Every structure is written in structure tokens, then in C-alpha cells.
Amino acid sequence: MLKETIEPLSIQYEFAKRYFKDFLTERKHLSPYIKPEKTPLLIIDLQGIKSRYLGVKYHFSQFKVYYAVKANDHKDILKTLAELGCGFEIASSQELQKVLELGVKGDRVISSNPIKPLEFIDNCYRSGVNRFVVDSFTEVDKISKIAPRSRVYVRLVVPNEGSDWPLSKKFGVDVDTALDILEYAQDKGLVPYGLTFHVGSQCNNFRNWLIGIKKTSELWQRAKQRGLRLQMLNLGGGIPVKYTYEALRIEDIAYYVKGLLQKFMPSFPHELQIEPGRGIMGDQGIMVCRVIGKAKRGDENWLYIDTGVFNGLAEALGGIRYPFYLDREGNLKEWTIGGISCDSMDVVARRVPLPEPEVGDYLYILSAGAYTTVYASEFNGFPKPEVLCV
Ligand SMILES: *Cc1c(COP(=O)(O)O)cnc(C)c1O
């Protein structure tokens, strides 16, 4: 991974500039929309989503793809994916409702959130969704009561090092506990179906998949010894996209993972699943906002924009560094980009190289397709970005 902070300003800026130009050259149908009257606006490329989905399908050829709806649940996106035959990974009754409304049947839906509300499990069961993740005995109790005879897969804990958005501390169990949970589920009349792990979102470290598959292999063999016949391995999410640096390529991850499965799995899983969210959506969206103010505070050049961490850029707080571009020439300066609200936490990025803008200029935020508008609130009375899918 390239560490942008040690690079000269011009290299960082050229990376963002080239990204912006390439993005629009490859997506000519977006050009008419990039100077909107009203900002902030998130522009999503539906054709790009299509080709990305087909790319994932092609490279992960033996896998069923379940799009993680939380990454971006806009209706047009879900519709585009549903028409291509994509499955969906959901966590809430509202997400369930959204996919059912598109005519997707329950057997194309799974839920990989380890702790689920009772009412959600009930709604799933009634809609024909009967595959659930578990990582606690309590969850097995809940599912066996509300959704009897469902298939359950257990979530293993794996390292999330090298992922820009780590997830693993909150969920997941070790191999011993996983076996106990699967056995307990069988005793409760559920079907021990398989396992999953999540390497962390925006994962740029092959090693996390290596450890995940080694653990899978151990669990697979020991489950067999205990008379549990597992069928399914779910690889979770984690496929990274380009931000201020180039990410691992999907084809390389797929090649690596398939090699690991050949090498470490005693018997090949009957069914393979993958749940990309960011990997499908992240670089299919560009956020257009405007500069609303400038200030010099000590040595720091501040630039204020009409969105912020509460209106769509929440991931900036957790380490995601978006590429920024604005259409001006001139000497580069380092800018701190402040969000629109009064909150001092509302800082979108620091040390961003840009030419000097004027108030009213468009500022383009690349790779804003995933985990942006879905996080947005109307804190301080500022609206969420509009979304335009073209
Ligand atoms: C969020 C999530 C995903 C999607 O992760 P990405 O890194 O965005 O691909 C997949 N599976 C589960 C269980 C998740 O919680």
C-alpha cells in the first residue's frame, strides 16, 4: 500500500487528477451531470456496477455473490443487481423489504449479521429467508425458536490487520467455540450449514484470507470428526477499491483464494459464497460538492465544503482517505477540509493537496459509492446528499 503522507504533494494530486479524468473518460454518460445546480450530489454509475458485478462473478467463478446491501441500498442499485441474478446479504427488516419489493425471493437472500433483532428473524422466516449466521449460543436459541430448521453458518474470528476498516473485534469466535455452537445448533434442530469470516473492509492484506482459510480448513476437518457435515464456505466482504492508493485487484484476490482452497481444504466446499459491498460499489460513485468557505488558521489552510462526516463522509472518521479533485490550475497547497456542520469533529480530511479554490467551486470526491449516503444524517439541519443513478 502506498502511504500518501510521505509522498510529495504533486504526486498525490496527480493520482487524484488522473483518477478523476480516467473515471469520466471511461464513463462518458456521467459527464452531463457533473456540474449540478444543487450539491451535494452522489452520482452512481449503474453500468459500472453491472460490469463490476460481472467481473466478480467471472473471477470468483465458483462463488455465489450476495451483495452486502448496507454498502448502498439505493433502489436503482438493488434493482440493477437483482436483474443480473445477484443475491443479497441483509441485516434488517427494512433491507429485507427493499429486496423483496424487487421481486427477489427469500432463497436469494442471506443474513450474515451475527446478532439479529427477533422481529427481523421472524420477518425473514416468513419471507423464505432461512440462512443465518451465528456466533453465540444465544443466537442459536433465538433462531431455533423463531425460524426452526433454518441453516446456520458460524462466524470465525480472523485478523483484520491491513484493512482500512477493521470489523473483527465485535464479532466472531475461535474454532473450538465454533464447533460447539454448530453442534448445539444441530441439537436444536437447525442445520449446521457452514462458516464465514470477514477479513475487514477495504482489506489490502492477502494474509487475512490465508489465515481465514487455514482456520476454515481446521474447522472443516474437526467438524467432520464430530459428525457435522458442513457444505458451505462464505468469504464475507473485504474486497478493496482504489482510494488515494491502488488497491489489490479482484482477479488477484480470487486467484489467491482459489489457490488456498485447493491447498488447504481437505474436501472442496460444496457451496461457496462471497458478500462484497464496497468491492462492488465503492468506486462506482462520485460525490460532487461545493466549496463554501476558506480560512487560514495558524499554518493551516482550511477549506469548507457543503457536506461532511455527518452527511455522508462518516468513513473519513475511521481512516478512509478519499481522493479529492477540483478543476483549477495553479500551485498546490495542503488543505484541511472541514465539513458543513458546527461540530469540530466534522473534519473530512487533512493534508489534501489542491490548487487554491474559490467559494462556489465544485469539489469532487472520488470512490464515494459505498458507505456514504447510507450513513448520512441531517445533523445541524443540513440535508443528505441527493443520489443520482445513471
Ligand atoms: C459489511 C459486511 C459485508 C461487506 O463488506 P465490504 O467490505 O463492504 O465488502 C459483508 N458481510 C458482512 C457480514 C458485513 O457485515
Image: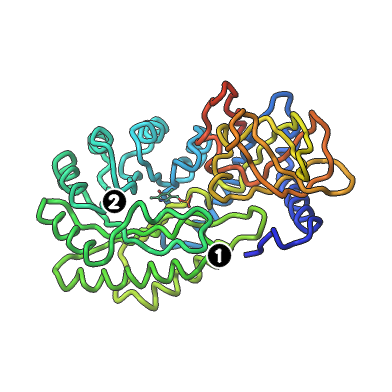
Locate the N terminus and report the quarter of the image it occupies: bottom right
Q: Amino acid at mark 1?
A: Glu
* Mark 1 / mark 2, whichever is N-terminal: 2
Left or right: where 306 falls relative to 277: right
Where is residue 284 shown, x and y percent of the image?
Answer: 61, 45
Mark 1 packing: few (<14 Cα in 10 Å), some, or many (20+)?
Answer: some
Q: Nearer the viewer, mark 1 or mark 2?
A: 2
Residue at the bottom extreme, as displayed: 263
User: Looking at the image, which residue is at 36% across and 76% down?
Assistant: 264
Left or right: where 93 falls relative to 119: right
Locate the C terminus and report the quarter of the image it occupies: top right
Residue at the right extreme, as displayed: 330
Where is residue 364 shown, x and y percent of the image?
Answer: 72, 40
Q: Amino acid at mark 2?
A: Val
Badge number at residue 88: none
Q: Nearer the viewer, residue 202 or 127?
A: 202
Left or right: where 48 falls relative to 176: right
Relative height, residue 303 to residue 204 (above, below): above
Label 1 sits on residue: 251
User: Looking at the image, which residue is at 15% across and 44% down?
Assistant: 148
Could you say whether the residue bearing mark 2 is in a helix, strand or loop?
strand
| CB contact under 8 Å: marks 1 and 2 | no
Quadrant in the rendering for residue 241? bottom right
Relative height, residue 22 to residue 30 (above, below): below
Where is residue 270 shown, x and y percent of the image?
Answer: 30, 64
In the image, the residue with mark 2 has its CB under 8 Å from the nearest atom of ligand 1: yes
Could you say whether the residue bearing mark 1 is in a helix, strand or loop?
helix
Label 2 sits on residue: 133
